[in-house]
Amino acid sequence: MEEIKKDNTRRDFIDKGIKIGKIGALLSVGGLAVVKIFGSKANAADNDMVELMSTDGTLIQVPASEVTQVPENKPAYDPREGFHNRKFVMVVDLAKCRNAKKCQSSCNKNHYITGDNAWIKIYKMQETEKTAPYWQPTLCQHCDHPPCVKVCPVDATFKRRDGIVLIDNNRCIGCRFCMAACPYSVRIFNWSDPWQGETAENTEYNPDHAGVPSQQGTVDKCDFCPHMIDKGELPHCVSACPNDVFSFGDMYEDTVTNGSGQSVQLSKLLKDRAGYRLMESLGTEPSVYYLPPSDRVVDFEEGVSNYTEFESVEKTDKP
Amino acid sequence: MNQTYDQLVDDLSPKKFGWKGKIWTAFLVFVILLGVYSYIQQFREGLIVTGMRDYALWGVYISNFVFFVAISLVGSLVTAILRLSGVQWSTPLTRIAEIIAVAAIIMAGLTIIIDMGRPDRMLNLFMHGRLQSPIIWDVIVITTYLFISVLLLYYPLLPDFSILKKRGQGSLRLREWYGKLSLNWSGDSKQHKIYTQSIKLLSVMIIPVAFAIHTVTAWLFATTYRPGWDSTNFGPYFIAGAFVAGAGAVIAVMYVLRKTYQLENYITDEHFDKMGKMLVLLCLVYLYFNINEYLIPTYKSTEEEAVHLQSLFTGEYAALFWTAIVGGLVLPVIALLFPKGRKPLPLFIVAIAVVLGAWWKRYIIVIPTLSHPFLPIQGVPESWRHYSPTWMEWSITLATLAGALLIITLLVRFLPIVPIQETAEEKGLLEMTKITES
């Protein structure tokens, strides 16, 4: 049963891979093809000569017969490799958070979280007695040196080239070493059968959309929503936040976009607002940056009424 | 002491259980069956039946696992270290130590499977194993240690099996089995040479592997960032603790066996005295590592460590912590400094205290750390902040302990507890027999 399921998942990945591969061909590898087409058209009169640019930047004439089309060799999309040439980052602006918890409820809903522990938690933080308290939304930090990945004995949790840390719930053996290793307490264990309702249960499993469906005896956590990125959309928490606390983007583009669709330069934002990362001294190199709660847009007090000490997943009707 | 070879073989060959032995075995089987029942529930419903949750993500299973690994280290201590250093008096204790080692390491392996969320995927460890994970190191060294331990238990048994085949008291079928297990041991010089060389080689090999099993087990914790675990002292600290637990276990078992089988001529008061002295030394070494482990972080009192240490010294875990340290370490040292304290019965009581203290010490090492993560515990049910094992967890844990005791009991039933051949050799009885036999 398990094997069949696994095979289906794999086929699904390949299907998806072909789709993305096509897009890739148009975007990047397409470059070579364009040169070829353009060259051959321009030099049609010269009979079999094409103009190409050499590696040092000079134009050279080459007989067309010498030029061969390089077959497209784009690797298929692999959920363990991720999106090519991307590096995802998130910025959390603590000055704007008023504990509205919309990020949490949207994440819970879209990942069908049924346990007692949400993947996003909004901590009530206060560094010292003399400093003001603030709300700190915390999710998986998608570290570049992830301690969880280092300790996983079966390669179930992995780090992708695009920066995202995911879990293969079909492989996890439930030893919970990753949870012990994570200093940010973001990993969640399915202690019992996580019955998530028809929709989730009938969806084919894919680590790109964690929690759909969740599996008993395995670890879950924030997946940075590759299933949304794939559609060209922002992660659920980013778009759900009414205060634009979250911004999400690509480090290579040096841009992050908030839920209202405004994009800013990442490096400038981090410099101007003194962005930092959680427990930077541990050397985990998180992909999530925080902007300190200075010049607050909202009052801390506004969130207090919304704060529940013992509940991070709202339960309406439990079957 | 005027003793004949026949008498020696009679004294030392395995005997059928009396009513006490039968009741004891039945009791162990009952405890194991209860545990099996609980485990079936756990297998079906998931680890929800335990007291563990997302913060206390490891519990009594893991501390019990560490305890078993610790106990199993004694096989290498008594058998290998004492054997290689040419200590003669340890001969009657070697088999007891090896039996304990084998039983404990088997149960350690089983306990770690019990803790897994997906035991059905156990083979992933071999199919997808990644060498950078300390769990894989543990899998490798524990299986290696199990193999070497079994061999180190088995090889010295070859001559004994041959003796039991010839003159044992068991039924004909049992003696046939002894014959098969003796691998045609005749005791000629060629066999003897291979035999002594193999045992020597195994004794050398088991020492680094034994150090490795417990060092790697310590690294399961020390490779994380968590206060209380994040310590470079952890490897040697665990090894020192393991020697204490193991020596305690050997003393306890040898006392019971001596009493049950009237082995006073073989396991003498002097043996207890010497084991007692060794236990003092081991306890002092462990105490030294404990001081390192707790004093230095207390001196510095970094924010995270301070919270953790406070819970141990004066907080939630203070009663357990101080009982384990004082009752399981300090008081035993004081008691054993006096010759009277090293007499069999007092030493037995001390050894039990040491073993119990060692068990709870593992609990104190594993559990409190998990309730003090770097970020505050918020938004989860109140019960998640404190871990206490459920009765299901207890019954499974007790079943693993009973399982180890059952393995020891059964091996004691069918194997000579005190090596016959070696004892005869040491007592100078062997030459005589050879002559009479030929």
Image: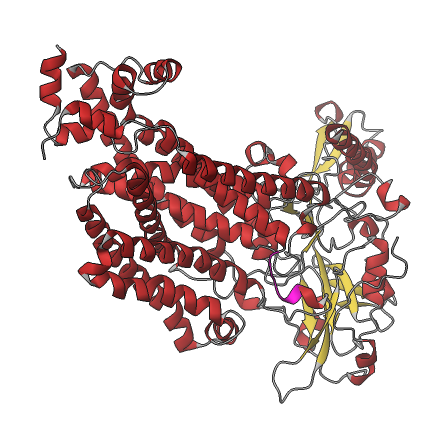
Dominant SS type (magenta): loop
Where is residue A170 drawn, in percent x and y? Answer: 70, 39
User: In the picture shown, does residue B152 fall above or below B239?
Assistant: above
Q: Is residue A309 magenta?
A: no
Residue projecting furthest to the front: B19
Task: Write down the quadrant of residue A6 in the picture.
Answer: top right
Q: Is residue B132 visible?
A: no
Q: Position of residue B389 (x, y in %)?
A: 60, 57
x and y, in percent, of residue A116 in the image: 76, 60
Front-most of residues B210 and A118: B210
* A263 over B189 or under it: above or below: below
**The magenta stretch spans which residues?**
B384-389
Tell me the colour scheme of the image.
Answer: secondary structure
Q: As rendered, which of A274 and A70 lies closer to the eye?
A: A274
Farthest-out residue, top: B438
In front of the other: B159 or B129: B159
The image quarter containing residue A290 is bottom right
Q: Residue at x 42, y 72 (%)?
A: B297
The N terminus of chain A, quarter of image: top right
Would residue B263 appear left or right of B3 to someone viewing this image?
right
Q: Quadrant of residue B240?
A: bottom left
Residue at 81% in and 64% down: A104
Q: Nearer the viewer, residue A92 or B183?
A: B183
Q: Is residue B118 left or right of residue A46?
A: left
